[in-house]
């Protein structure tokens, strides 16, 4: 039978903050979202909790409760780097590792087939915990038969736990206190007020009313606890070390020519890092000399980067300081990376890769074959109604690219022109309506109305717009035309 394990590194941002400040170990410490008096406390150690300093409080409130309170911010980049490091450590114990995208510090491992490598799963889990402790991370490992069962056990237990069968896992799961699962504080307090103190009581609640009473997070947790909604394990691919080697035909002692041999190696390493969505943190350089000696050097930029010119300048400065006893006969360049921001990846590819003239030649061929209106572009207009706020024009020139980092994924809205008339409905509110047919299910959520009225100077218009979500998850943009007394489908959000 397949076995699934979960490794929980509790309060990973707090552990990282304490690693950076080891002198804070005996003091109350909190992680805040911003280092300001009005910053919100996200994590608190046991010394802070003993002084009633809890997550959700303002940093200023915590300071009023304890003048010894220490606080700081753990950047997302540092957390991502730690997750990558921990994943590499866990690959020693299982080739299939999936870091959680919802909670930092949670990792799922495939524990199947390990009986041939370890005396027992208890020994395997103990080795994982000891290995992570060597790197400064305190963790708990739980080995079970389901993803949620192993996750809940890891969050609830202070020691490693291995279940003998699925029934034992389910029995333990129902006894897990609800506050151990890292829920939103408002949701946790609401459930505790209603007497829902364990997962067993939470699972017993009827699934039909969870979303309406407690929200989307509670509905998702309820679905996972029942065993629904979990996808198969999606392991992160094992990344081989980035290393490039070049053997020279004759001993080289000219640093300019040596740097020229290193340049293509560095460019290849940067290309591979970019494909992994990483930036270079450290260059490891090995020089093999003609007298069979070796010289190891390490070069690190101020911040992780993919800028080849900056890195080549650092390599040149390092090579100029070397006093080699013999010529170099072989060079080996290794690169260590960390997760890169989207802006860093864009800057690496900022050199135009396309031929603009070739693009226009392709457009001309399309127009010649399909007509002059085959290549169009949308232009914004000053309009009152949604369908009047844009117009299609023939594309004349391409706008130059302006790369930038989007803080959030944009919501794409598809507009139907003309709007699609919907079947009549007795009630004016669309809740429960089979608006998109039986396949998409009834409407389960409604946002609106937003009133659009005007047009008295030509033809008066009065519409009530709504966003509606069907059971299948589609978000439709509809409106009720008061004059025509009918519903219309204006568009869809994706």
Image (cartoon, rainbow, N blue to C red):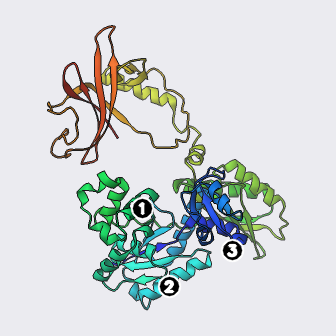
Residue 451 placement (x, y as % from top left): 33, 26
Determine if residue 117 is in view. no
Residues at marks 2 and 1 touching, judged by CB atoms closer than 8 Å: no
Determine if residue 120 is in view. yes
Kindly identify which numbered label has been placed on residue 26: 3
Residues at marks 2 and 3 touching, judged by CB atoms closer than 8 Å: no
Q: Residue at x 54, y 57 (%)?
A: 56
Kindly identify which numbered label has been placed on residue 126: 2
Q: Is residue 294 left or right of residue 234?
A: right
What is the C-alpha distance between the residues marked 2 and 1? 32 Å
Q: Earlier in the sequence, mark 2 or mark 1?
A: 2
Quadrant the C terminus occupies: top left
Kindly identify which numbered label has been placed on residue 188: 1
Q: Residue at x 29, y 20 (%)?
A: 462
Q: Residue at x 58, y 68 (%)?
A: 49
Dot 3: element: loop
Q: Is residue 324 left or right of residue 435?
A: right
Figure quadrant of residue 259: bottom right
Dot 1: element: helix
Q: Nearer the viewer, mark 3 or mark 1?
A: 1
Dot 2: element: helix
Residues at marks 3 and 1 touching, judged by CB atoms closer than 8 Å: no
Point out the residue furthest to the top here: 457
Which of these two is toward me, 302 or 490? 490
Residue 214 placement (x, y as % from top left): 34, 55
Q: Is residue 485 left or right of residue 356?
A: left
Q: Nearer the viewer, mark 2 or mark 1?
A: 1
What is the C-alpha distance between the residues marked 2 and 3? 27 Å
Q: Reply above or below: 159 against 397.
A: below
**Number of disc labels:** 3
Q: Earlier in the sequence, mark 3 or mark 1?
A: 3
């Amino acid at each position: 039978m397949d076995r699934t394990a979960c490794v929980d590194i509790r309060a990973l941002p707090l552990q990282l903050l304490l690693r950076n400040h080891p002198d804070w170990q005996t003091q109350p410490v909190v992680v805040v979202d911003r280092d300001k008096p009005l910053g919100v406390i996200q994590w608190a150690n046991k010394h802070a909790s003993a002084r009633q300093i809890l997550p959700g409080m303002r940093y200023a409130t915590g300071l009023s409760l304890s003048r010894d309170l220490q606080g700081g911010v753990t950047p997302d980049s540092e957390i991502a780097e730690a997750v990558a490091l921990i994943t590499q450590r866990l690959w020693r114990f299982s080739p299939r590792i999936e870091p959680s995208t919802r909670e930092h510090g949670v990792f799922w491992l495939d524990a199947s087939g390990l009986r041939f490598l370890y005396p027992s799963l208890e020994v395997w889990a103990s080795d994982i915990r000891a290995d992570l402790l060597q790197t400064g991370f305190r963790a708990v490992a739980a080995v079970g038969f389901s993803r949620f069962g192993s996750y809940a056990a890891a969050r609830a237990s202070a020691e490693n736990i291995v279940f003998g069968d699925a029934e034992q896992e389910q029995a333990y799961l129902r006894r897990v206190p609800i506050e151990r699962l890292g829920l939103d504080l408002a949701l946790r307090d609401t459930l505790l007020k209603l007497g829902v103190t364990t997962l067993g009581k939470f699972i017993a609640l009827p699934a039909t009313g969870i979303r309406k009473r407690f929200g989307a997070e509670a509905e998702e947790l309820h679905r996972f606890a029942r065993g629904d909604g979990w996808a198969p394990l999606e392991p992160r691919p094992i990344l081989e070390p980035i290393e490039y080697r070049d053997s020279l035909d004759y001993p080289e002692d000219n640093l300019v020519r040596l740097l020229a041999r290193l340049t293509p190696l560095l460019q290849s390493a940067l290309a591979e890092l970019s494909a992994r969505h990483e930036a270079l943190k450290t260059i490891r350089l090995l020089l093999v000399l003609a007298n069979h000696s070796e010289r190891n050097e390490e070069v690190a930029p101020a911040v992780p980067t993919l800028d080849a010119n900056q890195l080549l300048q650092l390599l040149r400065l390092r090579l100029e300081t070397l006093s080699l006893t013999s010529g170099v006969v072989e060079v080996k360049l290794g690169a260590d990376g960390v997760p890169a921001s989207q802006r860093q990846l864009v800057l690496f590819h900022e050199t135009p890769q396309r031929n603009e003239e070739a693009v226009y030649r392709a457009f001309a061929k399309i127009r010649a074959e399909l007509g002059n209106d085959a290549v169009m572009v949308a232009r914004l207009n000053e309009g009152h109604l949604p369908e009047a706020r844009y117009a299609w024009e023939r594309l004349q020139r391409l706008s130059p690219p302006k790369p930038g980092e989007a803080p959030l994924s944009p919501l794409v809205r598809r507009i139907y022109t003309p709007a699609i008339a919907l079947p009549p409905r007795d009630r004016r509110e669309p809740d429960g309506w089979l608006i998109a047919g039986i396949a998409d299910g009834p409407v389960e959520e409604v946002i609106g109305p937003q009133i659009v009225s005007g047009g008295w100077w030509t033809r008066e218009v009065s519409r009530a717009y709504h966003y509606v979500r069907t059971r299948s998850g589609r978000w439709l943009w509809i409106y009720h035309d008061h004059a025509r007394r009918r519903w219309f489908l204006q568009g869809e959000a994706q």
